Image (cartoon, rainbow, N blue to C red):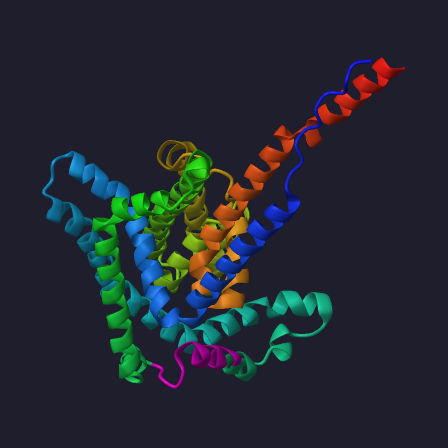
């Protein structure tokens, strides 16, 4: 009788358990410190994401033999210029549109309700305006505006109501740019230092996993930011030209909605058509709004996503949106910042675990086959 083959080596479950417990404890401690020190870690995390997004640009400029100081400062100054344009141009217009909406939207909505009165009366026997009073509609709008602006109802009053917050915001923004600049300068050193801490036996596996996580984050973050910027510019300019009310508020809003697959473009289109109808525009304006949305959607499907953004490597915008909402509810601003990295990392780790399981003897049944062969030989 032949001796049975050697049993496959069993996993040291106790060792694995303590490794997972140790890594989980360290991750929980780091997360707690990040949340606890959010006043410091939030600007640092934002600076890290900016450096992460701009690093390929810096690498490309260095390959083009651009002087190192220019290769670092030009991308950071470009981010600064975009931020200044947003604060000086976009943000005041958004605030002005919100104030204007809080003052004039009730009248427009009520005028539209009055136009619906004959149709509603012929079918229900009551006037719609008798069910929805102008005072209650105006009060609801004013309460919403007060929640957005606080006691101030003008942009200047809003800014001057808390000078300390303005200076804190300026200081945090300066900290973000400083962190981004120094992380860009030492990006390769930081990566190499992290690699030197990995045990040599696990270096190849860890490097492969980190590269997969980097591909997910890079593909999604840079792709979605580019798509968001294109959608924001296109929708805002188009809505302004079509004279849809509150363009500087609705434009960025529908651009964010557009990132939600299928639902976003329909929601943005319906919202703009309703606002156009409330403003008393003709059906031609509604057709122009529909053409704007459908034109950008087709352009995205045929050109932007396949040729510029490429594959979004599994992180669907709807999943990311729900994750951001959940993490934001749990951890505030820090949760919003860490939602995408945690989702990307968790997805890759789950895929790695599934792949290792499918390569194991427990999944393939090698051990069971070996035992059945021995049993057959004994019989």
For residue 357, side relative to residue 75 (left or right): right
Q: Which quarter of the rendered picture does the N terminus lie within? A: top right
Pinpoint residue 328: horizontal percent, then vertical percent: 49, 64
Pinpoint residue 345: horizontal percent, then vertical percent: 49, 47
Residue 131 seen anywhere in this rendered image of the structure: yes
Q: Main secondary structure of the magenta part?
A: helix
Seen at 26% across and 53% down, the residue is 183
For residue 17, side relative to residue 269 (left or right): right
Seen at 90% across and 15% down, the residue is 379
Q: Is residue 361 above or below residue 160?
A: above
Residue 257 magenta-highlighted? no
Q: Is residue 279 above or below residue 308?
A: below
Farthest residue, direction left:
67
Seen at 41% across and 48% down, the residue is 288
Q: Quadrant of residue 358?
A: top right
Q: Quadrant of residue 94?
A: bottom left
Pinpoint residue 74: horizontal percent, then vertical percent: 16, 49
Pinpoint residue 207: horizontal percent, then vertical percent: 41, 37
Q: Is residue 314 above or below residue 175?
A: above
For residue 224, side relative to residue 66 (left or right): right
Nearer-the-camera pick, 18 or 309? 18
Q: Write the start and end of the magenta stretch as one range.
A: 140-153
């Amino acid at each position: 009788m032949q001796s049975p083959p050697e049993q496959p080596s069993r996993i040291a479950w106790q060792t694995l358990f303590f490794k997972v417990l140790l890594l989980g404890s360290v991750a929980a401690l780091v997360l707690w410190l990040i949340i606890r020190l959010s006043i410091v870690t939030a600007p640092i995390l934002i600076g890290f994401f900016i450096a992460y997004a701009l690093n390929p640009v810096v690498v490309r400029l260095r390959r083009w033999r651009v002087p190192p100081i220019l290769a670092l400062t030009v991308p950071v100054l470009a981010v600064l210029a975009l931020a200044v344009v947003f604060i000086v141009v976009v943000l005041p217009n958004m605030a002005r549109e919100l104030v204007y909406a809080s003052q004039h939207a009730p009248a427009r909505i009520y005028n539209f309700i009055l136009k619906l009165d004959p149709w509603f009366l012929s079918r229900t026997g009551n006037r719609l305006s008798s069910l929805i009073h102008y005072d209650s509609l105006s009060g609801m709008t004013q309460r919403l505006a007060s929640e957005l602006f606080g006691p101030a109802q003008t942009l200047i009053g809003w800014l001057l109501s808390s000078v300390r917050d303005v200076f804190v915001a300026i200081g945090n923004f300066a900290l973000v740019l400083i962190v981004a600049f120094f992380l860009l300068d030492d990006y390769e050193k930081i990566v190499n230092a992290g690699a030197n801490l990995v045990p040599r036996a696990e270096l190849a596996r860890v490097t492969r996993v980190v590269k997969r996580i980097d591909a997910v984050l890079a593909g999604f973050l840079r792709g979605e930011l580019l798509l968001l910027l294109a959608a924001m510019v296109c929708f805002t300019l188009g809505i302004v030209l079509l004279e849809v009310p509150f363009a500087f508020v609705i434009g960025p809003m529908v651009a964010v909605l557009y990132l939600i697959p299928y639902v976003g473009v329909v929601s943005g289109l319906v919202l703009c058509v309703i606002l156009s109808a409330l403003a008393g525009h003709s059906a031609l304006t509604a057709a122009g709004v529909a053409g704007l949305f459908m034109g950008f959607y087709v352009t995205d499907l045929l050109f932007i996503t396949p040729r510029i953004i490429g594959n979004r490597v599994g992180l669907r915008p709807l999943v990311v949106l729900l994750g951001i909402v959940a993490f934001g509810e749990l951890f505030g601003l820090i949760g919003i910042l860490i939602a995408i990295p945690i989702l990307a990392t968790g997805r890759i780790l789950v895929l790695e675990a599934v792949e290792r399981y499918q390569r194991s003897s427990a999944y393939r049944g090698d051990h069971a086959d070996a035992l059945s062969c021995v049993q057959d030989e004994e019989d």
